[in-house]
Amino acid sequence: MKRLLQRNKPKAHILENMSRQTFKESECDEVIVEMKPNKDTRSIKQNKLYWLWLGILTETGNSQGALHQYLAQEYLSPVVEEVNGKPILVIKSTTTLSVKEFAEYLERVQEFGEGLGCVLPRPEELYLESLMREHG
């Protein structure tokens, strides 16, 4: 269970209700509570659009996993690190991208698909918000 807490809003009742509900719904005697800053990482709509597009791009004969790895390597500026004296290519994870960075990444994925002759759908409820464009 996750909740967004805001600095200037009451929180005690939220935490109390969440812990009561958790203990009520399970037979456990302990729970783990973790708090971390809210980073504005890629949105759920962006994620849905991305995997929808990767599913379509499998028509090229590649798996979604292979396409995901290829696109990340191609467009996310990998860096080379040395581990035990050997160079290792480290590719940034798409899950750590901000909403803006992921919008830019989606534009590159769209261009990649067009270059292969694939028409990627643009369902309005996903596309406009995912690429941070205005409706209309």
Image: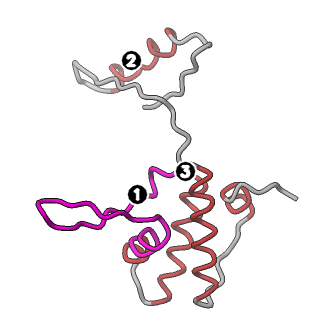
**The disc labelled 1 sits on which kind of residue?**
Ser
The amino acid marked with disc number 2 is Ser
Q: Which label is found at residue 19?
A: 2
Given residues 2 and 20, the one toward you in this image is 2
**Residue beneath label 3, please?**
42
Q: Residues within 10 Å of mark 1 (few under 14, many from 20)?
A: few
Stretch in magenta: 69-97
Dot 2 or dot 3: first in sequence order is: 2
Label ID, residue 136 = none
Please, which residue is most extreme toward the left here? 84
- Identity of the amino acid at label 3? Arg
Observer-nearest of 61 and 67: 67
Q: Nearer the viewer, mark 3 or mark 1?
A: 1
Quadrant of the frame with the N terminus = top left
Sequence-first tag of 3 and 1: 3
Badge 3 marks a residue whose secondary structure is loop
Locate residue 128, reporting x and y percent: 74, 59
Q: Which residue is at a point 45% across and 53% down the rendered structure image? A: 95
Q: Relative to 32, does residue 117 appear above or below in the rendering?
A: below
Question: Mark 1 and 2 residues: CB-CB less than 8 Å, in contact?
Answer: no
User: Is residue 70 covered in magenta?
Assistant: yes
Residue under label 1, please give it: 93
Q: Circle 2 sits in a helix, a strand or a loop, which is it? A: helix
